[in-house]
Image (cartoon, helix red, strand yellow):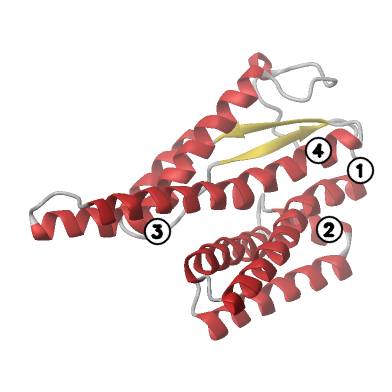
Amino acid sequence: MWGGFPPPVYATPTDRRFSRTELRHITIAFGVLTFDLWLIFDGLNAFSYGAYYGSGFSSAVGLSLLLGAGVAALAAVTGFLAHEMGHKFAAQHLGLWAEFRAFWNGLLISVLFSALGFLFAAPGATYIAGRGDRRESGLTSVAGPLVNLGEAGVLLSSAWVLGRSGTSLAYAALLLVGAINVYWALFNLIPYGPLDGAKVLRWSKPIWAVLFAGSLVWVVSLYLLTGVL
């Protein structure tokens, strides 16, 4: 997110990789988003199971909750955190100030929606400031979706290999996390408002068109072939 420079209390020297304030915001946003994804993946089902059978949680349910938390954390790290760090490191490489800030209202809303069974998350954004032009704005904006697409390629390729070897649990986890990364890239490439797509489109229409169309085809293909998302 360019402009909208954070309040002066947030200002830090440009030569620092992370400030204490930024690390605190990253940790909170990551924790809340992991909880959101855990609720959607497995938490709601497990609680419903325990309430329905009235016998608390069995060891199988406990294991399911633990595995669900691990998958949720992996999805939050790759889909959200790596995306934002892509923006941050690209901006810092260009000599710009860049730090992540959480959206407190967005985090609260995400928990409420996750309790209803679906994700609507706006955990925060990387603020960027400095003498950047349209090209630098486009480069820093495209970095996030590119990170997601690269991770999706690795995760989905790994899922395919494991699926052929008959490892169903790991296959399902990698498939889900990989699909989330593709979806996250597609969503952020929408050319609207503060999303990355608007800034990428202003910088280079061909690059935006290739990335957006490719992500859209990928999401549709995943849905048709696997039913994910």
Q: On the image, numbered disc 4 is attached to which residue?
A: 89
Task: Tell me the CA gap for discs 1 and 3.
Answer: 41 Å
Residue under the image location 69 percent in, 70 percent down: 157
Question: Where in the figure is residue 5, as x and y percent of width and height?
Answer: 71, 28
Please report whichever mark, 3 or 4, sits nearer to the chain's N-terminal start: 3
Left or right of 31? Residue 210 is right
Task: Tell me the CA gap for discs 1 and 4.
Answer: 17 Å
Q: On the image, numbered disc 1 is attached to which residue?
A: 133
Residue under the image location 27 percent in, 55 percent down: 61
Q: Quadrant of residue 7?
A: top right
Please report whichever mark, 2 or 4, sits nearer to the chain's N-terminal start: 4
Label 3 crowd (10 A; few <14 / some 14-19 / many >=20): many
Residue mark closest to the camera, 1 vs 4: 4
Task: Tell me the CA gap for discs 1 and 2.
Answer: 11 Å
Task: Tell me the CA gap for discs 3 and 2.
Answer: 36 Å
**The disc labelled 4 sits on which kind of residue?**
Phe
**The disc labelled 3 sits on which kind of residue?**
Phe
Left or right of 54? Residue 102 is right
Q: On the image, numbered disc 3 is attached to which residue?
A: 41
Residue mark closest to the camera, 2 vs 4: 4
Residue mark closest to the camera, 3 vs 2: 3
**The disc labelled 2 sits on which kind of residue?**
Arg
Q: Secondary structure at mark 3?
A: helix
Question: In the rendering, which numbered label is found on residue 202?
Answer: 2
Question: Where in the figure is residue 63, as x and y percent of width and height?
Answer: 34, 52
Task: Tell me the CA gap for discs 2 and 4.
Answer: 21 Å
